[in-house]
């Protein structure tokens, strides 16, 4: 039987795979996208209602080009699908003056010409009384930051991809690649073989099993996310008209992030630690009992948000696929010049998905790249 062939095969339909399938389908390429789970499973990193989009990026200016591209991409997706996929909350990034969250956000905002306000502790208390701050704290407020409706956006990317002729297949586990021919070939667990002019691997935490060359650079972690209930009469303080998406770095370096309530059917104010409560993830293993993480976050909530009940009303697991330097790893595999990977995003990649999908499409189809991705290549680890 002849092996089926596509211009581009995408492996994994979390947000990176969905964005790649969507972007590639707009180039009139023949696209096949394969996912081991169902259309909206909760096993990987992309489930849940919301993710933060911000451009005053404390993580540095290297991300600016991709952020601009991604912002345009979210708007384009909203336009194509005719569905509201973002809310206009703005974003506030709070911390002690010299810390990376404040100093880094300010620097990137200035370099990138991103609209922002630099707030003193008194300004924060006055404009955003939901937050308790010390007098040595400052903030950057970015009015153009927003929450993205995450699950809805991912499904709309897939809808658009299907409308443009992409083939999506669920319940299909890709098990290995055959790399000895001009075109790489994927093999599925059911022994089917399909060839592609290019493969884009967006398998999240599972990427390291498909591409063993990445084993030593990637460490997936379980991370919990929690929901908190406002105290009586404080509901309106935390809804989307009053409460921005936020980052808050405390004096001990713990970095919390969160979202207003009422953006989705998830009940309460969604808050998590970005750099705490990480538990090493291994395929097939269950995470520990999530309740053991409640006390630590309750202490932080009590100190930062006096108008929230400190104990989480609900908590759920998600996965961060971390690289050694907490940045992205987007590159070509050394096993074949037409196999690319995009799914190592160290817990802050969702906002970039429309841009990363575009870049992966361009890499796969041999087109000129819309942004420079040299900072995200694997060679940076070899040269250290
Ligand atoms: C709690 C939490 C909060 C976050 N908040 C933000 C935020 O506010 N802003 C932000 O920008 N980012 C945020 N992130 C990070 C962001 O969500 C991730 O970077 C992003 O979702 C990663 O998507 P992915 O497609 O790479 O991986 P995944 O979503 O894990 O997708 C990988 C897919 O590949 C499939 N797969 C795996 N192996 C195979 C195989 N062999 N064959 C077929 N399919 C396979 C999996 O089933 C899965 O569906 C957050 C992450 C978490 C966990």
Image (cartoon, helix red, strand yellow):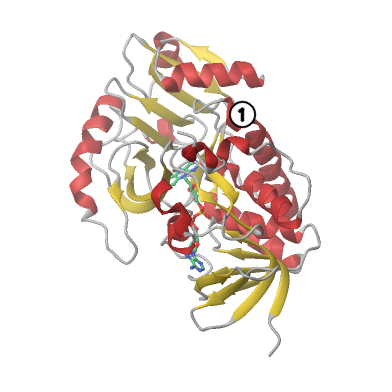
Q: Which image quadrant is residue 63 in? A: top right
Q: Nearer the viewer, residue 293 or 199?
A: 199
Query: Could you tell me which residue is drawn at 79 percent across and 57 percent down?
Result: 27
From this view, report whether residue 33 is shown above or below residue 63: below
The residue most toward the right is: 28
Q: Nearer the viewer, residue 168 or 266?
A: 168
- The residue at which mark 1 appears reads as 144
Judged from the image, the secondary structure of the residue bearing numbered disc 1 is: loop
Residue 14 seen in this snapshot: yes
Q: Give residue 352's position: percent from left, percent from top.
A: 59, 42
Query: Could you tell me which residue is drawn at 65 percent across and 40 percent down?
Result: 70
Residue 21 placement, left or right of 80: left
Number of on-image labels: 1
Q: Nearer the viewer, residue 324 or 103?
A: 324
Query: Could you tell me which residue is drawn at 39 percent across and 52 percent down?
Result: 319
From this view, report whether residue 122 is shown above or below residue 321: above
For label 1, the crowd category at 10 Å Cα-Cα, with few meaning under 14, some 14 to 19 and many 20 or more, is: some
Residue 81 seen in this snapshot: no
The residue most toward the bottom is: 1
Residue 365 placement, left or right of 275: right
The C terminus sits in image quarter: top left
The N terminus sits in image quarter: bottom right
Q: Give residue 374's position: percent from left, percent from top.
A: 62, 37
- Callout 1: CB less than 8 Å from ligand 1: no
Q: Give residue 44's position: percent from left, percent from top.
A: 43, 58
Q: Which image quadrant is residue 228 in? A: top left
């Amino acid at each position: 039987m002849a092996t089926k062939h596509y211009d581009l095969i995408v492996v994994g339909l979390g947000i990176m795979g969905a964005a790649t399938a969507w972007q590639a389908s707009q180039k009139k390429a023949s696209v096949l996208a394969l996912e081991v789970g169902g259309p909206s499973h909760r096993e990987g990193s992309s489930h849940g209602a919301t993710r933060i989009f911000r451009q005053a990026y404390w993580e540095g200016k290297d991300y600016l080009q991709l952020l601009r591209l991604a912002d345009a991409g979210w708007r384009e997706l909203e336009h194509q699908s005719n569905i509201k996929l973002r809310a206009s909350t703005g974003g506030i990034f709070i911390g002690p003056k010299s810390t990376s969250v404040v100093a880094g956000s300010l620097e990137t905002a200035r370099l990138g010409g991103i609209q922002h306000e630099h707030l003193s502790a008194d300004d924060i208390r006055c404009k955003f009384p939901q937050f308790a701050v010390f007098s040595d704290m400052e903030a950057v407020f970015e009015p153009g930051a927003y929450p993205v409706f995450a699950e809805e956006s991912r499904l709309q990317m897939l809808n658009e991809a299907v409308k443009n002729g992409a083939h999506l297949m669920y319940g299909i586990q890709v098990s290995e690649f055959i790399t000895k021919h001009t075109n790489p070939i994927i093999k599925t667990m059911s022994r089917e073989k399909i060839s592609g002019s290019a493969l884009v691997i967006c398998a999240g935490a599972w990427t390291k099993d498909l591409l063993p060359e990445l084993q030593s650079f990637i460490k997936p972690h379980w991370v919990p996310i929690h929901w908190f209930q406002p105290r009586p009469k404080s509901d309106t303080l935390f809804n989307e008209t009053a409460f921005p998406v936020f980052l808050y770095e405390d004096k001990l370096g713990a970095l919390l992030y969160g979202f207003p309530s009422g953006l989705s059917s998830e009940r309460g104010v969604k808050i998590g630690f970005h750099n705490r409560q990480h538990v090493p993830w291994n395929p097939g293993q269950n995470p520990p009992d999530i309740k053991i993480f409640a006390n630590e976050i309750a202490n932080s909530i009590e100190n930062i948000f006096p108008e929230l009940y400190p104990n989480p009303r609900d908590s759920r697991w998600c996965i961060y696929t971390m690289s050694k330097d907490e940045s992205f790893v987007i590159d070509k595999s050394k096993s074949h010049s037409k196999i690319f990977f995009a799914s190592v995003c160290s817990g802050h990649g969702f906002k970039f998905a429309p841009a990363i999908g575009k870049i992966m499409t361009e890499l796969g189809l041999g087109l000129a790249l819309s942004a420079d991705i040299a900072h995200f290549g694997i060679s940076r680890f070899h040269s250290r």
